[in-house]
Image (cartoon, rainbow, N blue to C red):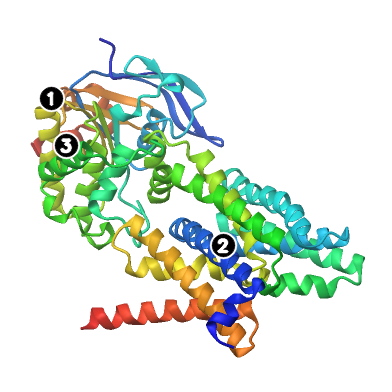
């Protein structure tokens, strides 16, 4: 079985600035990969490249064994972008309509929400604990509730791969912890492969099966335990900072 | 003059039919444009329409022929706005500003060079739906049919892209093509709407009914239907009011639409306070 994602020799630039240099790694089915790194380290550039939202100068990306330019089965990929200006707050869609977009986007008339689709939407909202919000307008919800709706939209197609770009940036610590617990459950119970981009290397150490540390190039990839003893990370952070992150767990 | 008598005139029948159809188009497309923060594209394209009508009049082409000259010019400029905002590292409003000022400048230049047709140009600037010809009505029906079929066919893609473009792309929506279709349909609608309210007031038909509907609707499909209903109400009431009170029709239609928006907005605020 081919890896879910395979990246080799990826180079991306914005004008004269290198965003990513020679990044290579693979993500296997069932992995929970946390992509961490400082601001401007190329995390979001990597996500956009993986999803085909921006093109890079060199390198190859394959999704489920298919080169990215030829990949068409986007129903197998769920995506949750950063929670900043995700949609126009006056957008008059109900929670059910937004989640239904995950099933309908890219499908033409006469495709409408079927009875099966409705039950799938209801089931997803139930699993996310927001079934009671289904008739509410998305713009009327709190940040945490909106994030759950957007996660439901990403999950309603039962994707094999879920990519989340700093999904907790606008959440309070309590909601953030509940959100991480939800992701762990999705990864363990459904076997969904997760890629989570975050600043929060200390918190995700508890849940992710692998950590990828990026600073315009790949500094480290491995388990959290390996991260704590990695000489590359000691060289990059200094021993004290590395020790402090690892001692939090 | 009673309503029955007014309706017996063929010019009124033509005005009500064409006005309602064009109102529906503006209202439906307006919802997508307002939510995508592209409300002023209607204004920009209207300015380009001014230039293109001046071009048609320069070559002594009037009525439906002027519309047929305007259509390709305005559609081309709508794609120009899209391309500038995508490729030239500038925001949508800047691109609209550039193309819009080009349209006005070209119009003024052509009007000056052509001489003599300033009076005709004025009728396009302020519209006169009561003078709409049979050919223009047929053209409006055909183009309205095309726009509504395309919006229905691509409804899911349009809604997904309006909600969030990145998410839509990852869901397999060809957002570049859908964006191009949306601006082309807007261009087409703007050219048709110049006869209803005039070039100066077209953006009001795109913005007012949709903004009123977005205050009230509890769902996206409901917003589109409500917006269309409010636009038709505004256009029909405006035409009757203008005939009854002997007022300019285009401006009356816009003022009625504004009245509907003001009622909806203040009604919602009062309701929320209670």
The residue sitting at 13% across, 44% down in the picture is A128
Q: CA distance from mark 1 to mark 3?
A: 12 Å
The residue sitting at 75% across, 65% down in the picture is B104
Q: Secondary structure at mark 2?
A: helix
Q: Secondary structure at mark 3?
A: helix
**Label for residue A204?**
3
Q: Which residue is mark 1?
A: A225
Q: Is residue B210 left or right of residue B51?
A: left
Labels 1 and 3 touching (C-beta < 8 A): no
Nearest-to-viewer mark from 2 and 1: 2
Percent coordinates x, y for residue B122 in the rendering: 77, 74
Q: Is residue B133 above or below residue B267?
A: above
Q: Is residue B104 above or below residue A134?
A: below
Q: Is residue B125 left or right of residue A140?
A: right
In this view, the residue in front, B112 or A83, is B112
Q: Which residue is mark 2?
A: B22
**Label for residue A75?**
none
> How many numbered marks have been drawn onto this rendered protein structure?
3
Q: CA distance from mark 2 to mark 1?
A: 66 Å
Percent coordinates x, y for residue A213 in the rendering: 28, 30
Which chain letter goes with mark 2?
A: B
Give the farthest residue toward the top: A1
Quarter of the rendering containing residue B172: top left
Quarter of the rendering containing residue B198: bottom right
């Amino acid at each position: 079985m081919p890896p879910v994602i395979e990246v080799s020799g990826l180079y991306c630039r914005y004008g004269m600035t290198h965003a990513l240099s020679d990044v290579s790694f693979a993500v296997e089915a069932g992995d929970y990969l946390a992509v961490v790194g400082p601001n401007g380290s190329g995390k979001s550039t990597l996500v956009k490249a993986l999803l085909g939202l921006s093109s890079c100068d060199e390198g190859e990306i394959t999704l489920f064994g298919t080169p990215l330019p030829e990949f068409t089965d986007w129903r197998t990929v769920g995506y949750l972008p950063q929670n900043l200006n995700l949609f126009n707050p006056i957008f008059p869609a109900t929670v059910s309509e937004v989640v239904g977009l995950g099933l309908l986007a890219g499908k033409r008339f006469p495709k409408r929400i079927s009875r099966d689709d409705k039950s799938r939407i209801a089931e997803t909202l139930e699993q996310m604990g927001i079934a009671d919000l289904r008739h509410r307008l998305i713009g009327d919800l709190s940040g945490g509730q909106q994030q759950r709706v957007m996660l439901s939209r990403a999950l309603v197609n039962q994707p094999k791969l879920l990519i989340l770009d700093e999904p907790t940036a606008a959440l309070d610590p309590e909601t953030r912890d509940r959100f991480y617990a939800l992701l762990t459950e999705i990864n363990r119970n459904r076997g969904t492969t997760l890629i989570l981009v975050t600043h929060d290397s200390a918190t995700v150490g508890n849940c992710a099966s692998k950590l990828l540390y990026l600073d315009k190039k790949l500094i480290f990839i491995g388990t959290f335990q390996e991260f704590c003893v990695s000489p590359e990370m000691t060289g990059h952070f200094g021993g004290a900072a590395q020790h402090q992150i690892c001692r939090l767990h | 003059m009673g309503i029955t008598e007014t309706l017996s005139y063929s010019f009124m029948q033509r005005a009500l039919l064409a006005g309602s159809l064009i109102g529906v188009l503006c209202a439906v497309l307006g919802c997508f444009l307002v939510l995508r923060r592209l409300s002023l594209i209607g204004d920009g394209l209207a300015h380009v329409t001014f230039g293109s009508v001046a071009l048609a009049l320069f070559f002594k082409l009037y009525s439906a022929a002027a519309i047929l000259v305007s259509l390709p010019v305005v559609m081309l400029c709508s794609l120009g706005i899209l391309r500038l905002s995508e490729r030239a590292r500038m925001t949508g409003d800047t691109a609209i500003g550039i193309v819009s000022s080009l349209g006005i400048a070209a119009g003024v230049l052509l009007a000056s060079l052509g001489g003599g047709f300033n009076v005709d140009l004025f009728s396009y600037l302020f519209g006169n739906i009561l003078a709409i010809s049979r050919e223009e009505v047929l053209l409006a029906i055909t183009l309205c049919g095309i726009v509504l079929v395309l919006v229905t066919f691509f409804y899911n893609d349009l809604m997904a892209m309006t909600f969030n473009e990145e998410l839509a792309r990852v869901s397999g929506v060809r957002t570049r093509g859908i964006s191009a279709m949306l601006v082309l349909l807007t261009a087409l609608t703007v050219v048709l709407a110049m006869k209803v309210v005039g070039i100066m007031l077209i953006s009001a038909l795109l913005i007012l009914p949709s903004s009123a509907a977005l205050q009230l609707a509890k769902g996206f499909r409901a917003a589109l239907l409500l917006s269309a209903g409010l636009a038709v109400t505004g256009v029909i009431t405006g035409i009757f009011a203008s005939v009854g009170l002997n007022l300019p029709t285009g401006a009356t239609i816009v003022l009625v639409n504004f009245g509907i928006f003001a009622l909806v907005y203040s009604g919602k605020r009062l309701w929320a306070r209670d």
